[in-house]
Each structure stands twice: as C-alpha cells, then as structure tokens.
C-alpha cells in the first residue's frame, strides 16, 4: 500500500539532520579537537539543561500550543536559585538576611514559583482561549520584568559550594547534569507513553474537538501541560545557574526559540499530535552540534546566529511540508 | 423573449460508483419563482453545481433565454445573468456593506499615476442597490452588524447589481425567524414583478406554497416531474418525493424494547434559531430513529444532550435519576456516548493509531495504581474490537487516517463499545460508507440493543430510518413534529411531518 518509501521525500524530510551530519563529519576530520572526549563531554553538559527546556516546550507544541515564556522562566529560576544560594559572606549579597536553605529545598521553591506562572499560562490558553503564541509572549515579558525587579539587574555570584557541587560535579566521570537529563527524560517519556495524561495530550494535538467529544478534559490537560513545562524550566534554570557559577537576568534569553527549533528538528510537529522524547533529545543534540561545529570552524559568533536562524526557519518549513503532503 | 429564462435538459452526472444525476430537466419561466424539491441527497445541489460549472456535467444542455450556453465556472454564470445565494453566506463581516458588495470588482479612479478605489462611487452605488431591495442601510456600516437575513438581502442586492436575471436561493430560510422570512419574501416578490426569476430550494411546504409558481421534484438523482403549484396538492408533492420501492437490505430487527431508559423533557436551545421544547423518551433495547430534513436541528438537539451545545432549559432523566450535562465529559460519566456526524472534524484523531483511537474514551478502566496505563490490556481490548467489527488493517498501530471511511467509522464505534455507555447516540452512522460496511454497522446496532442499550440514530436516509428503527421521531423546523411506530412508519408519514412547517 503506502509502504513504499519515497527516497526523495525521506531525504527532504530529514534534510536538516543529514546536512548537519555532513557538517559534523567534515569538522571531525578537519578539526581533531572537535571529536575529543573533552569536547563531547562539554557538549553533553551544554545540551542537558537545554533538553530539559525542550521537553517542557514539547508538551505545549504537541497540543498545538507553544511557550515563549520558557527562556525567561529559565532566567528567573536561575536568578532566584542563585540569590537563595549565595554564600553568607558573598560580596553584594542580594538578600543578606535570607536563611541558608537546603539546596534541594531551593530547587523546589524555584519550581513552585515557576509553576504559578505555568498555571497562569495554562489558564490563559485553556480558559480564555488566548492563542498560546500571544499569551506566553505576554508572560515572557512579565517574567523578565519580575526577574529585573528581584535582581535589580545586578549579576549574581558567590555561590555556596553545595550548589556548585550538585550542578558541576560528576560521578565516575559522568557529569551529574547528564544524570539529571536521563532522569528527566525518563520521567517525561513515561508520562507521554504510559499515562492517561500523555494519551490525552496527543489526542488534543491530533484533533481537539474529537478529543473533547471523547470525554477528554481538554482544559485541565492543557493546564497540567503548561505547569509541567514551567517546572522543567525551573529545573533547567537552577542547573544553568549552578553550572556557570553565576546568573544574570539575561540568562535563558531566547532559549524558547532554540527549544522550539530543536523540537521541530527532532520531529515534534508544530501542527500538533506528533512528537517523541527521543526526537526532542536528538533535536537538541543536533542543534548543539551545529553551534559547536561552527565554533570549531572559527566562524564569528555573529554569523552563528544567522546560521541558527536559518536552521530554525528551514526546520519548520520542512515540518509544515510533511503536513501539507499528507492532505 | 424566450419562453424560459433557464432550461436544463437531460442533465446527467456520475461520480465514481454513483450516478448522482440521471437525465434531469429544469425549466424556469421569466419572472417566476420555481421551487426545487426533493429529499436529502436527491441531487438538488449537484444539479445547481452543474449549472454553475462547479461540476462538469457528463450529458445535457443548458439554455439561458433560449440560447445554448457552456458555463465553465460561477464567474461565467454571473456573466450570463445567473447568481446563487448560498445556504451558508461567505461574507467578510469586518468590512463595510459597500466593500462586500463590490468585493473583487471595486470601482477604481485615477489618483495621479495610481489607480485607487473610488469609495465615493462605491458607496453611492451601494445605496442605490440597497434601496432596490428596500434595505436603507448606511453602506459604510460593517456587514457583521447586520442580521443573517439582512446579509442575505445584501447578497441578493449584490446579485441584482451584477445584472442577475436568475437567482438561486438554496435553503434561504433555514436560519431565519418568521418575520425575517416575511421580509425576504417581500424582496423576492418585488424582484419577481420586475422580471427576475428565482430557483427556490427548500424543504418547507408552507413556504413553497406561499412563494412558488412552479415546482420541480427530484428523487434519488432522477427527474420526477414539473407542475404548476396550482395543479399539485401537498400530499401529492410528498408522494412524488418519496415514491420509491423499499428493498430489504436490512438485518432483522429482532431486538425487544423494554422499560424507559432515558427521558428528555423540554429541551430548548440557548439560541432562538435552534431546537425548541423537544421532549422524547428512549427505552432499553430500543433503536430510536430521528428523521427530518437537513436543517431541522436534529444534530443540534443530540449534541446538546451530549453536552457539546448549550441549552436554555430542559432536563434529562436517565435510569430514573435527573442528570446535569454541561460538557461531553459529564455525558460520558453518566453513561451517554455519541458518534458525531462530522467524522473528520469531531471523530477521528487523524495522526494517532487505531489503538489510541479506540481506547481514548475509556482509559480510566486501564489505570494501574491510578497512574500507569496497562498497555497489554488496552491492546487486548483493541484486538477484540478490531476482530469483532472486522476492521481491515494490517496492525492496530496503523494510523487511522490511512483507513477507508467505513473502517474509520468502525474504529469510532469500537471507541464507544469499549466505553460501554447505556445510551449511544449515532448521528448519520453510515454516511459515506459502502453497502457492505453499512450492513455490518446495522448488525452492531441491533446487537447493542439486544444487550439492553438505548440507541438513538439520526438518519437522513429514508430507507435506513425505516429499516433500522423500532420507533421514529420526526423533526421539522426546530421542533419534534411526529412520533411514528409500527404500521404508521411509512415514507409518506415521515415526509408529512418533516415538511410540516
């Protein structure tokens, strides 16, 4: 029947991945440092929190939504975590009288704060029927404003040792960050494939009216998706902040776009209903490889942005093409 | 002047597998209203689409004012003086009346080297044409601020402004109130007196009596005949519309209706244009048919019972208990399921697998520890249904969008078999499905009835309605107008109640 694989279509649909594979092979051959273990480890560490952001965004995309507040929530969570985990004697400590809380309690506080914004995103999208693009764009600015108010735009540093250990340490050479990534991905994979919530999510993306007629509580499901996403951004923000040993309000800027692009490259359809956790991971990996390859080729950072922008547009154009071809 | 404004002779049109039109004729005299009647699917719309070149006819000829025409598209039709006011208007509500009237043919004027739109002339002309249909509106008013009937009048004015001498009105009153219908008829009579002809497609007998001069009746894609309205009685019209042989292609209705399962009392829509004060009962083990013509609001009533639409008043008593339904989730919780009419729009989850499509309404039953879905049990459920309904597919992982219409419908039925509701509402359950699959679906319905479930079937196909229902409710113009069972359930009686208003 339709089992015949069309070689041309397959090539075009996976064009971005193929193109980047060629690029990676080229760089590996020409720049030996690129294929060193140190660089691969570095790639994994960079990719880990980005995968966590992209996992959050993927749920929104699968239900035909999006979340443009992702990057700014990463920034807010990163700053909050940094402020709460500054050393008692850190110079210019922002909250001098704040008690020294357990590092994981701080993580939970960040998640709780972000989930409030996620809840609001969900209500705006599900109950007020505001298009997710606009609703979360507003939230992006609100969250950025809050981060500015809290930090007064002052960079945060002087972290406690337990914070840096938790985020920068490793066990038997495996970075903790990588382990967190595996845990987060496993949980999300379970949710997407083995829970009612996951099935409902795909059903809403596939055909929202049909899902509703089948008894799916569309509003509740969407709200859960936006809250879950916000929690994941908070975790990512916490990790970014600790990993680089400091944070500023600019942390996380435009990460939502990278995440959306990575999801799309990895086969999450912006038309909803389709997307897998493995795809999200591949998408982020591909995107990070692109950035790293360009660095190793000595391409000026300014040009790297142009290249990334092109990849985003082409990736989404190819995704839409698949959808149109199906009709 | 030619005797007829429009003549269509021996029009035939086939689609793969069906002959939609077979030697159909239609002759409209100048300055008259010609009613075109027939059941759902009799071929009225297809005939009009052939006239406007939207479908290419296989055979037949079209004469306008005695001249043979070859019309390739609606634009050319308009050029020859033929215009159509659609059942569902397609205006641009946020632009002005004048802009809508001149959409695509704005008058231009020179502005230096540029051609710009001549708003002044456009507005003045619009006023003139609106006066023509006795609609003194400000042409700068947004079209969206008008009522549906006023928009329809604007459409008619637009047709007249384009020099149309024959206007097709397709179910023009389906969403109008009585006063609005009166206003529309005034315009039609006025234009008629000035020599404009109309083809009036409608199901409403009383309206046809009021407005039409001649009538042509179609049945199952064939031409039945044409009469002057004075020469034919209402009963005769009904008889001609349904006069077919009923052949037995239905399984034996050997289910036995029991005691009352559900009672619906005084269901009235939140909208004045939809169903009003509908009451009926459904018994255990009964297949209750809902007949009526398109626009009678049967679907809307059922969707309200299922919680998709909102009601102003009314109550449902299910299993002796009054229940409140605000959304489909409530309905399902109370044991009501519904297979909607629009399979593509509200039925299938296209990019998901058959397994997901079958299980989506009953995942609660397969939770372990309240969280994890038991995939093995779900797969068993899916396999059981795929086998029972003989769904033709290589695997349950196949995407539903790759199946044929009949198999998709069986998957949707499986979804509700899995959910196991007490009441199952099926809206046009066999639409767009081949004969073999239809028979299988009827068997499933009877099987479900035998298990003691109550089934409500909306059907616009008369033989199906009569062949698979234990009892029939007929709706016409927003109301339930008749209840038929046993000997009384005949084509003539259904049609009599269905055209009551």
Image (cartoon, coloured by chain):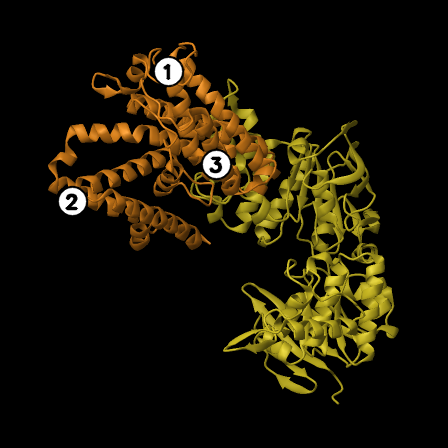
Assess disc 1: are there few (<14), some (14-19) or many (≥20) residues with their C-alpha within 10 Å of its C-alpha: many
For the N terminus of chain B, the image quarter is bottom right
Q: Is residue A99 left or right of residue B217?
A: left
Chain of the residue on which disc 3 is drawn: A
Q: CA distance from mark 1 to mark 3?
A: 25 Å
Q: Is residue A211 left or right of residue A59?
A: right
Q: Are marks 1 and 3 on the same chain?
A: yes
Q: CA distance from mark 2 to mark 3?
A: 40 Å
Residue carrying label 3: A141
Judging depth in this view, the residue of B114 and B8 nearest the camera is B114
Q: Which chain is orange?
A: A
Give the mark nearest the N terminus, 2 or 3.
Answer: 2
Assess disc 2: are there few (<14), some (14-19) or many (≥20) residues with their C-alpha within 10 Å of its C-alpha: few
| Secondary structure of residue under mark 1 | loop
Residue carrying label 2: A26
Give the mark nearest the N terminus, 1 or 3.
Answer: 1
User: Residue A190: image x %, image y %?
Assistant: 42, 26
Looking at the image, the residue that sits furthest to the bottom is B1
User: Residue B171: image x %, image y %?
Assistant: 74, 62
User: Residue B317: image x %, image y %?
Assistant: 78, 31
Q: Is residue B480 visible?
A: yes
Picture layout, residue A26 above or below residue B247: above
Looking at the image, the residue that sits furthest to the front is A92
Give the mark nearest the N terminus, 2 or 1.
Answer: 2
Chain B, chosen colour in render: yellow
Residue carrying label 1: A85
- Write the residue at 83% across / 73% down: B189
């Amino acid at each position: 029947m339709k089992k015949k694989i069309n070689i041309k279509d397959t090539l075009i649909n996976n064009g971005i991945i193929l193109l980047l594979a060629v690029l990676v092979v080229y760089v590996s051959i020409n720049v030996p440092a690129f294929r060193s273990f140190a660089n691969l480890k570095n790639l994994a560490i960079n990719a880990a929190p980005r995968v966590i952001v992209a996992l959050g965004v993927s749920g929104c995309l699968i239900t035909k939504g999006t979340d443009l507040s992702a990057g700014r929530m990463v920034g807010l969570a990163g700053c909050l975590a940094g402020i709460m985990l500054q050393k008692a004697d850190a110079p210019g400590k922002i909250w001098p009288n704040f008690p020294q809380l357990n590092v994981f309690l701080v993580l939970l506080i960040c998640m709780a704060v972000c989930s409030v914004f996620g809840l609001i995103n969900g209500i705006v999208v599900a109950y007020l029927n505001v298009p997710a693009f606009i609703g979360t764009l507003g939230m992006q600015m609100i969250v950025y404003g809050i981060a500015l108010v809290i930090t007064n735009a002052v960079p945060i540093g002087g972290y406690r040792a337990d914070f840096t250990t938790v985020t920068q340490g490793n066990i038997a050479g495996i970075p903790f960050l990588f382990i967190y990534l595996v845990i987060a991905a496993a949980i999300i994979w379970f949710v997407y494939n083995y829970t009612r919530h996951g099935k409902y999510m795909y059903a809403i993306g596939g055909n929202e009216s049909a899902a509703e007629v089948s008894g799916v509580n569309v509003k509740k499901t969407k709200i859960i998706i936006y809250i879950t996403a916000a929690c994941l951004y908070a975790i990512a923000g916490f990790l970014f902040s600790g990993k680089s040993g400091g944070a500023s309000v600019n942390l996380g800027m435009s990460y939502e776009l990278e995440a959306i692009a990575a999801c799309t490259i990895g086969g999450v359809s912006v038309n909803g209903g389709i997307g897998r956790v493995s795809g999200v991971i591949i998408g982020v990996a591909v995107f990070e490889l692109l950035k790293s390859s360009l660095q190793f080729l000595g391409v000026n950072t300014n040009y790297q942005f142009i290249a990334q922008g092109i990849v985003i547009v082409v990736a989404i154009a190819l995704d839409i093409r698949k959808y149109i071809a199906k009709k | 002047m030619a005797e007829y404004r429009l003549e269509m002779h021996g029009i035939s049109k086939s689609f793969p597998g069906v002959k939609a039109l077979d030697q159909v004729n239609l002759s409209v005299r100048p300055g008259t209203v010609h009613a075109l009647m027939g059941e759902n699917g009799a071929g009225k719309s297809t005939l009009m689409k052939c006239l406007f070149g939207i479908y290419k006819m296989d055979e037949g000829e079209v004469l306008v004012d005695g001249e043979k025409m070859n019309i390739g598209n609606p634009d050319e039709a308009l050029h020859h003086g033929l215009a159509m006011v659609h059942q569902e208007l397609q205006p641009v509500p946020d632009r002005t009346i004048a802009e809508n009237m001149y959409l695509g043919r704005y008058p231009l004027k020179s502005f230096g080297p540029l051609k710009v739109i001549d708003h002044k002339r456009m507005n003045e002309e619009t006023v003139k044409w609106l006066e023509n249909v006795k609609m003194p509106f400000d042409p700068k008013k947004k079209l969206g601020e008008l009522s549906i009937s006023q928009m329809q009048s604007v459409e008619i004015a637009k047709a007249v402004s384009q020099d149309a001498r024959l206007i097709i009105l397709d179910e023009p009153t389906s969403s109008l109130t009585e006063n609005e219908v009166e206003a529309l008829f005034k315009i039609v009579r006025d234009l008629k007196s000035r020599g404009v002809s109309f083809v009036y497609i409608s199901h409403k007998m009383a309206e046809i009596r009021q407005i039409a001069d001649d009538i042509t009746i179609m049945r199952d894609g064939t031409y039945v005949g044409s009469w002057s309205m004075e020469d034919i009685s209402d009963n005769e019209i009904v008889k001609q519309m349904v006069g077919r042989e009923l052949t037995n292609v239905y399984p034996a209705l050997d289910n036995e209706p029991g005691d009352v399962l559900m009672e619906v009392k005084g269901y009235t829509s939140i909208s004045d244009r939809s169903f009003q004060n509908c009451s009926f009962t459904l018994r255990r083990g009964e297949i209750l048919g809902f007949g009526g013509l398109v626009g009678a609001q049967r679907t809307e009533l059922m969707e309200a019972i299922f919680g998709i639409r909102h009601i102003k008043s009314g109550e449902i008593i299910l299993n002796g208990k009054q229940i409140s339904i605000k959304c489909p989730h409530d309905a399902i919780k109370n044991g009501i399921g519904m297979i909607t009419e629009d399979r593509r729009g509200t039925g299938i989850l296209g990019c998901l697998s058959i397994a997901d499509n079958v299980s989506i309404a009953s995942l609660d039953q397969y939770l372990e520890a309240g969280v994890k879905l038991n995939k093995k049990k779900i797969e068993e459920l899916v396999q059981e249904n795929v086998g029972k309904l003989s769904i033709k597919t290589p695997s349950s992982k196949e995407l539903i969008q790759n199946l044929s219409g009949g198999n998709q419908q069986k998957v949707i039925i499986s979804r509700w078999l899995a959910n196991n509701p007490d009441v199952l509402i099926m809206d046009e359950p066999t639409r767009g499905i081949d004969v073999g699959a239809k028979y299988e679906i009827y068997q499933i319905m009877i099987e479900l009835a035998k298990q003691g479930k109550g089934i409500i079937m909306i059907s616009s196909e008369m033989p199906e309605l009569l062949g698979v229902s234990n009892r029939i409710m007929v709706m016409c113009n927003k109301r339930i107008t008749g209840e038929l069972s046993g000997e009384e359930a005949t084509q003539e009686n259904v049609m009599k109640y269905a055209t009551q208003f």
